[in-house]
Image: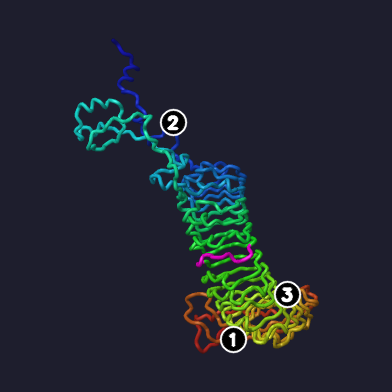
Amino acid sequence: MRLSLPLLLLLLSGPPPTSGMEDAAFPHLGESLQPPPRACPLRCFCPRADTVDCNGLDLQVFPDNITRAAQHLSLQNNLISKVPRGALSRQTHLRELYLQHNQLTDSGLDATTFSFIIQTSSPPHAISDPELCPAPPRPTIRLESALTSARVPPAHVSQLNQPPVGVSSFYLRTTPQPPPPRATWPPLWAPSPTPALSPASKLQHLEYLDLSHNQLASVPAGLPRTLAVLHLGRNRIRWVEAARLRGARGLRYLLLQHNQLGATGLPAGALRPLRRLHTLHLYGNRLERVPPALPRRLRALVLPHNHMTALGARDLAGMPGLAELNLAYNRLVSARVHRRAFRPLRALRSLDLAGNQLTRVPGGLPGSLHTLRLQRNQLRTLEPELLAGLDQLRELSLAHNRLRIGDIGPGTWHELQALQVLDLSHNELSFVPPDLPEALEELHLQGNRISHVGAEAFLSTPRLRALFLRANRLHMTSIEPEAFLGLLHLSVVDTAGNPEQVLVRLPPAAPRQPRVLRAGLPELCRREAGTRAPPPHTGRPGRGRSVQLAHQAHRQRQPCRTHGHTPRSPCRWRQQQ
């Protein structure tokens, strides 16, 4: 029998390779040596493996192919109305989630959006949601590897010809009985008739969650414990339930501004589980009093643009560590602000009471204040007793009130030894108030009725740097030439908006000591060359400038060259061109 050459070569080459014998490292037909592309939702931008940016794409459906490694997920400025169940179950590494400016409602965020629901009465592995975790396959016991070591008689082995139900590699101590019929098996995944449900977070690393500018009527449930910032501003939240925030015990910043929280929107103790809360934003709601029983460690409470009309003696007593309190633009009146309302706040640094209806400075202000804002009230008097003890105050705003010179009591500024910024603009002052604080650096007097500035107006403020006198009643010669003598740091004088252009002459600055311009000089010339003062500047009122400043031609000096310099020779200053 003669074989053809092709058939002989085929027989010698051996059988064709099977799928299990292929080399996985060798590229096959249609494959590339490049790594597979990263999973990124359609139309989205994924600059890194941990970032998915779907901002402003008018998406109506939550993306379903987000990479498991995502840590920053941006879905803001879309049209998403629902987060499907299990959509975030794979994002276990997510740290920041941005969902603001969408159309999310309470029905679009169910109890399993941010957490699983676990039946505490079931075994630890049993999860009540079959979609998130399907039921495991029923176990089968394989007895082939264990019959010999278990010393099962051959008669029993012959009865087990069917595929047994069993466990591999178990050493059985007793002879197993044949399994019951399949119809009589108890259901392994049947839920308990009265299960006890408890949430377990699946976003174990989520720190920032922004759900602002949506249509939520309540705080979402199942918030993770690791959450640090929760932004719920500009929704439709009317009531905050304490149970919804109990899981987010690590929350530091809670933003609830511009919602519909009324008198009963924050019941007593609703925020007490948040023991680490640092900042609470509640502005733009309908609150009538400071919410009771707030966390004791709260450091910043922001409550402007509400409907508060009174402050009781104990309204702020539960927050001894409060450092910033903003009650601006409410309806507070002096008669309903208790004289001890602010006394418990021993650590308060900033107090904002602007835009209310106060007629006098509140009493009992803590001595730790650095900033006090009382602009846009109805203040008619300043009493020294009410400002006593504020020796750390650095900024005081009294703008847009009804203060006159006669309404400022003698010695009012004596206690404010650290005051650097004083705003008395838009009042009814006829001249510069006397005896201003010595540390003052910035003085706002615009929008008053000042018509003359005397020679002794600023004798008590040698550190003054900026002076604002615009929109008063000043004329060209209303400011005395000696008014600014001794103000060596004064660099800004604003006199715009007056009936006439005002002539301002700044005093000559003090001579400066030479400074090292480059490293490596052995010594500096310590002699200072005499310079002639520049001629006085005479501003003409026809240049179109509302402020005429006497600019001095200060020479920038350089240290003497040490090469060839002897102590007997005079210093030769070289003017820099």
Q: In the rendered view, would you say 221 is above or below 533?
A: above
At label 2, which amino acid type do we have?
Leu
Q: Name the quarter where the N terminus is drawn.
A: top left
Instruction: Give the residue pinned by disc 2.
Output: 29
Q: Report the front residue among 146 and 539.
A: 146
Taking the magenta stretch, the answer to whether it contains residue 425 is: no
Task: Name the residue at 62% across, 50% down.
Answer: 215
Q: Looking at the image, what colour scheme do you see? A: rainbow
At label 1, which amino acid type do we have?
Ala
Question: Where is residue 37 shown, x and y percent of the image?
Answer: 48, 41
Instruction: Give the residue pinned by disc 3.
Output: 426
Question: Where is residue 387 shown, x and y percent of the image?
Answer: 62, 81
Q: Report the front residue among 488 and 345.
A: 345
Q: Earlier in the sequence, mark 3 or mark 1?
A: 3
Q: Nearer the viewer, mark 3 or mark 2?
A: 3
Question: Where is residue 69 shown, x and y percent of the image?
Answer: 46, 47
At label 3, which amino acid type do we have?
His
Q: In the rendered view, would you say 327 is above or below 87?
A: below
